[in-house]
Amino acid sequence: MTKIYKGMKPTRRSFLTGAAASGVAMVSAKAANAEGDPAIINKQEWNQYLGEGVDARPYGMPSQFESHVRRQDVPWLTADPVSSVNFTPLHELDGIITPNGLCFERHHAGIAEVDPAEHRLMINGLVDRPLVFTMEDLMRFPRENHVYFLECAANTGMEWAGAQLNGCQFTHGMIHNVMYTGVPLRLLLQEAGVKTTGKWIMPEGADASGMTRSIPIEKALDDCLVAFKMNGEALRPEQGYPVRLVVPGWEGNMWIKWLRRIEVGDQPWHHREETSKYTDLLADGQARRFTWEMDAKSVITSPSPQAPITQGPGPLVITGVAWSGRGTIPRVDVTIDGGITWQQARMSGPSLNKSMHRFYLDVEWDGKPMLLQSRAHDSTGYVQPTKEQLRHVRGENSIYHNNSIQTWAVNEKGEAENVEIS
Amino acid sequence: MTKIYKGMKPTRRSFLTGAAASGVAMVSAKAANAEGDPAIINKQEWNQYLGEGVDARPYGMPSQFESHVRRQDVPWLTADPVSSVNFTPLHELDGIITPNGLCFERHHAGIAEVDPAEHRLMINGLVDRPLVFTMEDLMRFPRENHVYFLECAANTGMEWAGAQLNGCQFTHGMIHNVMYTGVPLRLLLQEAGVKTTGKWIMPEGADASGMTRSIPIEKALDDCLVAFKMNGEALRPEQGYPVRLVVPGWEGNMWIKWLRRIEVGDQPWHHREETSKYTDLLADGQARRFTWEMDAKSVITSPSPQAPITQGPGPLVITGVAWSGRGTIPRVDVTIDGGITWQQARMSGPSLNKSMHRFYLDVEWDGKPMLLQSRAHDSTGYVQPTKEQLRHVRGENSIYHNNSIQTWAVNEKGEAENVEIS
């Protein structure tokens, strides 16, 4: 039943010459018919041998051809990799789920290797009944599942001063988006009995940095989770195994990893990580504090500096991600001319509260330079600002909470560069 | 601000003795206060050292304490592991996403290691323009993201003849649930131009088994995807890297991996995998065929034979998964007495079309034996049948499409066993 066409081995160019103008007519039928040799598909090496069996990979890993898809650190950024960050390769991903092995890491004393049988979680302070939980104890409480983004407050922070890092992995890769399974923190606090004077909590990590942050009791009783699974399986060590705090929509530093203690108090603690760090220094020398919610933001992941256009003019999928700490993303606009004209992108995938969203704009690229930007609208009506608008309000001293519009300049060759336009 | 309590190191028993009767009052405050020594949390080994830095794990792996969470094959099941199956450890997972490393495998000639630069996808047969696509060509078509379950038609097949395999990993583990990113097959077929005589497609795999199946053109033009990502990253080699067919809601064997060719024809091909295999032999010797849709099904994943109750009486989370090839799962019922009384379970997590759903029933276990079952209702109104009901219609010769209710018998010690009740 199979017809066989004689001809040369097809090449990329032969199939794309003559691509039609419509959105989907992107493979030249003439070229395929004339030059495509279907016999090629029966001559592939992997058609000739038996591969590894079902006993070979009890826990699977990506293909050898995907070894370039990796978290990447920037050695010059900090003095030591135990207190530093690496970045999610956003330019290589699609959809909205970040695979666990590629979720960016941020440590203050390296990765604690915690034995879950020995780990304990204490609740103390202004409570009726101080409690210590084993992991097995936590497994007896009702659980919930939610997909949430986790974004470091410093994500895109280097860009305040101008276009610096060349690639969305580095400008926007301090974010990941996974499904968490955990116990609502509310249930554990109710078990301990928060006194009427208890207005704040201070979660604390079990690693050598003993990370602490202050969180208002309203948030703690709202949607915080004490989570032990991500994307179905146990948390990864670098994400706080065996248990971390999930603080939906709020800056990542508050999502305490290796969670060992939650103290209830009557006021914030003003520890280092909420005074000298994770506050926003304004132009007048004053610092904004308690800026926990992550504002609506988006970035185009492809094309981008690490994901250039390799096929020349013709049909092009422009894609990216958008998120908001305040809700969902009903709409993203994309411009290819630096903001002169905007087109509404197509969203694809579930639209979930405080989760990443994926957008696409399917265009016909004419081979001319482009200035690519995306602009997220969240469910509160908030619209992602330009860098100029953000600087106007917050000055240029800030590091944290840069949610401004990102620009990629694409040249005739399809190469993209991080630029700033005004 | 932290109060320090003097006492012994807490043990599991000390915290659970005296657990209250309410759903969430499950940790004895008295025990915690009297015996819990909060100082333990400052004496943990991992609090004393700096861990690995952000340069250590470009692609992360699970904790050393999770090495028991693995795909598991059953050596006696087939003659050779290159043509066999392994099973998703459902009893260790939660939520609805299956991590890529734990998605069950089914191969017919082992894992093909395909170079994406050399791979081609051909569309031929009853089309106006036979086409050959490179991977880069596929990247130019509009993409979509969907979470779908993939279930092998033989999942639970060994149980037709009675309770045989002791653990939901083995009875129900030929299923996984991930987010796919891919091009609607419809767009590729439109590009090739299906002739009016084209009523069926035959996708073909590039591995040494050259797997083929017949699929009606209506399904091909409806929701099938030519997918290249799972859970955000490239497909895994054992799941068809670099490209597989996604046939939502239909049996897994049709989801051709390492997809290299799609032929369009005017009738089904009746190949081996749709005649001697993947048909259902009835009691009268006739075989049901074209039974592609996976009926609504559910299973309790914990407690279960591989996930016994280890903490004795008190609050207990009963949890499991449910799915239907025909839509969503608005409701799951759970019984602890073998079907005498049923309680409606709590669903948690997004309810997506043709995706796994997660359910929970939070109970107070009195320490007496239980007969646990779950029963899924799908969005068409269909209710998961008992094994007796299914046998009444289909006899006892079948292997495939066993979607009947599963029973676990739990004894006083909390140990669970696969049993059959009638």
Image (spheres, coloured by chain):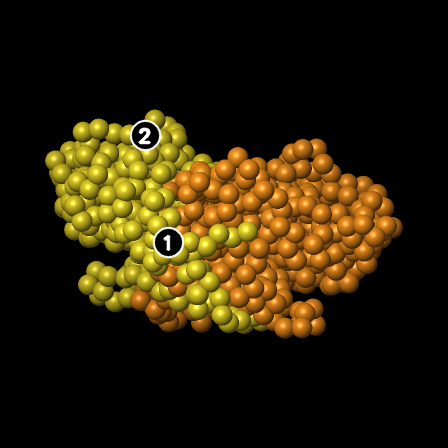
Chain colours: A yellow, B orange
State how many labels appear: 2
Q: Residue at x 57, y 58 (%)?
A: B211
- Looking at the rendered structure, the secondary structure element under dot 1 is loop
Can residue B272 be seen from the camera position used here? yes
Q: Which residue is at the far top? A: A381
Image quadrant in which you'd find residue A300: top left
- Percent coordinates x, y for residue A152 in the rendering: 32, 49
Q: Residue at x 78, y 53 (%)?
A: B281
Q: In the rendered view, would you say A43 is above or below A356? A: below
- Percent coordinates x, y for residue B370 in the rendering: 79, 53
Image quadrant in which you'd find residue A103: bottom left
Looking at numbered disc 1 in the image, what kind of residue is underneath it?
A: Gly
Looking at numbered disc 2 in the image, what kind of residue is underneath it?
A: Gln
Q: In the image, B158: left or right of A169?
A: right
Q: Label 1: few (<14), some or many (≥20) within 10 Å?
A: many
Can residue A279 be seen from the camera position used here? no
Marking on residue A344: 2
User: Which circle's residue, 2 or 1, is located before the other in the chain?
Assistant: 1
Q: Which residue is at the far front? A: A6
Q: In the rendered view, would you say A162 is above or below A334? A: below
In the foreground, B73 or A156: B73
Q: Residue at x 59, y 61 (%)?
A: B106
In the foreground, A350 or B78: B78
In the foreground, A90 or A287: A90
Q: In the image, B33: left or right of A327?
A: right
Distance between mark 2 and mark 1 Cα atoms: 37 Å
Marking on residue B298: none
Query: Can you identify the residue that label 1 sits on?
Result: A36
Q: Residue at x 81, y 41 (%)?
A: B341
- Looking at the rendered structure, the secondary structure element under dot 2 is strand
